[in-house]
Image (spheres, grey):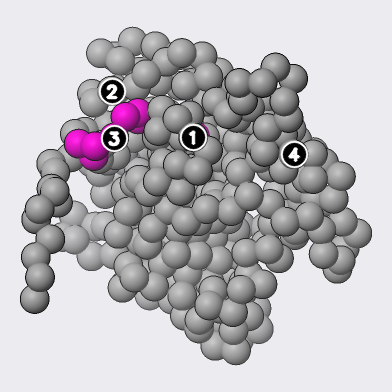
């Protein structure tokens, strides 16, 4: 089952079940989070809650996308209670791309990226219930940085790059007792600044503080272990760049369980009612092929198991804070 959140023509929120080119309204549901909270309280899975609620009016899904009325498939009414994070160097092949950006001057030197990747290869897939190697982890922002499917990703005036990262995203809700619940997965574009990161790997934290997008659909249930999608960039209506990307645990050096453990082991991430959007990493970047995306371009991330592609443009964002603007009080 795949779910979307969307707005009606009058601006009311709805949850829909995707069936081909249509979305069927879930009776009485204004948000995926509300349905998930009902499921936690009743001890049933999200698909069961949807089935019990029943389906109603049918909407033209492709028209909803074209009209910009599809929302991210999970959100919080207060964006500050949505945490957006990610893990890197999680996929087989991801270290090669990263290592090119972080090569040291000394020939033959082993970079920190390669060391961390090797730790993942050696210990990122522990037996069930056991603690494995800790992955690279980063913070992107709260729900305020999330851009709906089809909308433009804002490019800050200080940015040095506008790079896509096609990834799987885990979507979670924290229960009343502090238990994290995985609702499912979505496609994501973890928009980053690779030029800044290449200057020095210690700039990774800065490079990740950008907008992002995920969706348009939330896929419930377990994932196939092998997933192959396509990442594209369009410029002036023409394809500028295309490349396949692999994901799923068969193509990763960390298990999802291990990545989830090392995120939710921190008690500050177990606040009841919060949602978490967690990017699982990629091994495919247009930046590695010498591509520089720019305002006006369109990113497209597609993978058959997730339904419709995730598309986002790029638009220049106005400067909000300049040197000397911060004032004493």
Residue at 53%, 38% (x, y): give it: 201
Q: Name the residue under label 3.
A: 159
Q: Mark 1 points at which residue?
A: 200
From the viewer's side, name the closer residue of 162 and 2.
162
Locate the N terminus by quadrant: bottom right
Residue 90 position in % (x across, y down)? 68, 42
Look at the numbered disc 1 and give the secondary structure of its residue: loop
Residue at 33%, 10% (x, y): give it: 238
Q: Mark 2 points at which residue?
A: 294
Looking at the image, tell me whether mark 4 or mark 3 is earlier in sequence order. Answer: 4
Residue 158 position in % (x across, y down)? 24, 37
Looking at the image, tell me whether mark 2 or mark 3 is earlier in sequence order. Answer: 3
Look at the numbered disc 4 and give the secondary structure of its residue: helix
Residue at 54%, 74% (x, y): give it: 269
- Image position of 293 (left or right of 158): right
Look at the numbered disc 3 and give the secondary structure of its residue: loop
**Mark 4 surroundings: few (<14), some (14-19) or many (≥20) residues within 10 A:** few
Is residue 163 part of the magenta span, yes or no? yes
Which SS does the magenta portion mostly show? loop
Residue at 47%, 56% (x, y): give it: 139
**Which stretch appears magenta?**
156-165
Could you say which disc has been placed on residue 181 in the image? none
Looking at the image, tell me whether mark 3 or mark 1 is earlier in sequence order. Answer: 3
Query: As drawn, which residue projects farthest toward the front?
Result: 106
Pair 4/3: label in front:
4
Q: Can residue 26 be seen in this view?
A: no
Pair 3/1: label in front:
1
Cα–Cα span, label 1 and label 2:
22 Å
Judge whether 304 appears above or below 30 on screen: above
Cα–Cα span, label 4 and label 2:
33 Å
Residue 63 position in % (x across, y down)? 29, 39
Cα–Cα span, label 3 and label 1:
15 Å
């Amino acid at each position: 089952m795949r779910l979307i959140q969307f707005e009606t023509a009058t601006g009311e929120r709805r949850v829909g079940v995707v069936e081909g080119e249509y979305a069927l309204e879930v009776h009485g549901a204004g948000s995926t989070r509300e349905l998930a909270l009902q499921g936690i309280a009743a001890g049933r899975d999200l698909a069961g809650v949807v089935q019990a609620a029943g389906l109603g009016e049918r909407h033209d899904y492709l028209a909803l996308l074209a009209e910009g009325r599809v929302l991210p498939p999970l959100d919080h009414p207060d964006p500050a209670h949505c945490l957006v994070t990610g893990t890197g160097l999680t996929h087989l092949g991801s270290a090669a791309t990263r290592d090119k950006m972080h090569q040291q001057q000394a020939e033959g030197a082993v970079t920190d990226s390669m060391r961390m990747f090797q730790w993942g290869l050696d210990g990122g897939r522990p037996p069930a219930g056991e603690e494995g190697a800790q992955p690279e982890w980063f913070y992107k922002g709260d729900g305020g940085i999330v851009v709906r499917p089809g909308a433009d990703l804002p490019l800050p005036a200080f940015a040095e790059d506008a790079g896509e990262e096609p990834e799987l995203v885990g979507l979670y809700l924290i229960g009343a007792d502090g238990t994290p619940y995985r609702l499912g997965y979505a496609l994501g574009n973890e928009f980053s600044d690779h030029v800044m990161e290449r200057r020095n790997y210690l700039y990774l934290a800065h490079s990740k503080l950008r907008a992002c997008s995920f969706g348009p659909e939330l896929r419930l249930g377990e994932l196939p272990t092998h997933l192959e999608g396509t990442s594209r960039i369009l410029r002036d209506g023409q394809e500028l760049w295309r490349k396949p990307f692999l994901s799923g645990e068969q193509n990763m050096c960390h298990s999802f369980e291990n990545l989830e453990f090392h995120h939710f082991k921190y008690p500050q991430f177990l606040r009841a009612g919060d949602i978490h959007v967690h990017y699982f990493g990629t091994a495919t970047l247009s930046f590695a092929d010498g591509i520089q995306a720019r305002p006006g371009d369109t990113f497209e991330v597609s993978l058959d198991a997730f339904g419709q592609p995730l598309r986002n443009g790029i638009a220049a964002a106005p400067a909000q804070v300049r040197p000397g603007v911060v004032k004493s009080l």
